[in-house]
Each structure stands twice: as C-alpha cells, then as structure tokens.
Amino acid sequence: MFIRNEPFKLFLKLYPVTSIILAVDLLIYLMFVVSGTWGLAPEFAFRAFEFAAGSNEAILNGAWWQLITPIFLHINFSHILFNAFSILIFAPALEAMLGKTRFVTAFLGTGIIANIAALFLEPAGFRHYGASGALFGLLGIYIFLVIFRRDTISRQDQTIIFVIVLISLISSFISADVDVLGHLIGFLSGLVLAPLFFLNKTR
C-alpha cells in the first residue's frame, strides 16, 4: 500500500493530484534556493516569503490567501525532504481510494483547518509554513480507516499506520521548532472529516 514502485509516467497517470502537489512544493522550494539561498534575488525571496508564509497578523489584516499558501511553502532542505517524502508515501493510496476531487479537498481542507486553528489559538505574531498540517490530516484519515473500515487496509498496513502515527505524534512534542498545534488539529480534522470523504464510497 505504501511501497511506490510504479514507473514515473505511470505514477503521474495514476496519481495526478499527488504529482502536482509534489511538483508545486519542489518548484517553490527551488525558487527560494535560487533567489534566496544563492543570493541571486534576495529582495524577491524576502517579498515572496512575506506573501506566502502564514502570518496571523497579516491574515487578520486581510491576507486570507495565507490560510492556503503556507501548505506549499518550505524553505530548508530537511523540511522539504521530510514532507515531500511523506506525501510520496502516504498520498497516492488515498488519492486512489478517494478520487482526485475528494483527495485534493481532504489535503487542502485539513491543512487550511490547521491554519485557521493557528489563527485563533496562536498569538498575533505567530508565523507558520509547511504541509505538516495537511500530512497529519491524511494520517487522521488513515486512522479512521483502520478503526471503522478495517476491510480496506491489510493487517500489516494497519500496524504500519499505527506505528507511524504514534511516532509522528510523539516526535511533534519532542522536536524543536515544530507547530504542535498544527499537527494535532490537522490530525483531528482528518479523523473527524474522514466519514464525509468516504460517503457513498464502496468498500
């Protein structure tokens, strides 16, 4: 379920939404590397970050798009590596089960809910970026499947899911510079909304 061995062209055909998300994440990251890290256009990099990063103060002043854009923003290698790898592993199976429209709704929806929670529960000066809220939303959906629709996932994959979710939640509390609230809200939103995403879906 989580092992990806399809040829590149087949992967693009089977999982178009996952492919687009990965491409957008990587292109935005490379843009910041070239313009900011390499110093070719530092002013552009600064303004692009100010535009896309989730700033509670900016959102409250009308920058509503910052409830969405942070989901695709990563500015260091370890962050993009971890999130891109996680998307590559966990997203395709859900895209196949949900279909393109429901999957993109689930991914963006849980990420946006996590960002809305940050808006109301974090101080005005709080800033955030990354796909972690949406990724934890996917994990919440997987936990729903394991608990309520066990016939859709093999016993081995159920064990893998439980272990990964447990490790991910624990690491959220012990790792530095982690948006713990975003992870928890993303996870809970995926768990709670999962029945809607699978409404009228055959087993």
Image (cartoon, grey):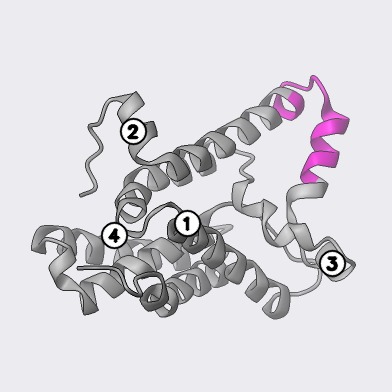
Q: Is residue 145 above or below residue 3?
A: below
Type of residue at label 2?
Phe
What distance separates the C-alpha of mark 4 from that of mark 2?
A: 23 Å
Number of marks present in the image shown: 4
Q: Of helix, strand and loop, which one carries label 1?
A: helix
Type of residue at label 3?
Glu
Write the residue at 30% across / 74% down: 144
Residue matched to label 1: 101
What distance separates the C-alpha of mark 3 from that of mark 2?
A: 40 Å
Residue matched to label 4: 164
Type of residue at label 1?
Thr
Q: Give the magenta range.
A: 35-49
Type of residue at label 4?
Ile
Q: Of helix, strand and loop, which one carries label 3?
A: helix
**Which mark is nearer the camera, 3 or 2?**
2
What distance separates the C-alpha of mark 2 from that of mark 1?
A: 17 Å
Apparent side of residue 80 relative to residue 32 in the rendered image (left or right): left
Residue matched to label 2: 11
Q: Which mark is residue 57?
A: 3
What distance separates the C-alpha of mark 1 from that of mark 4?
A: 26 Å
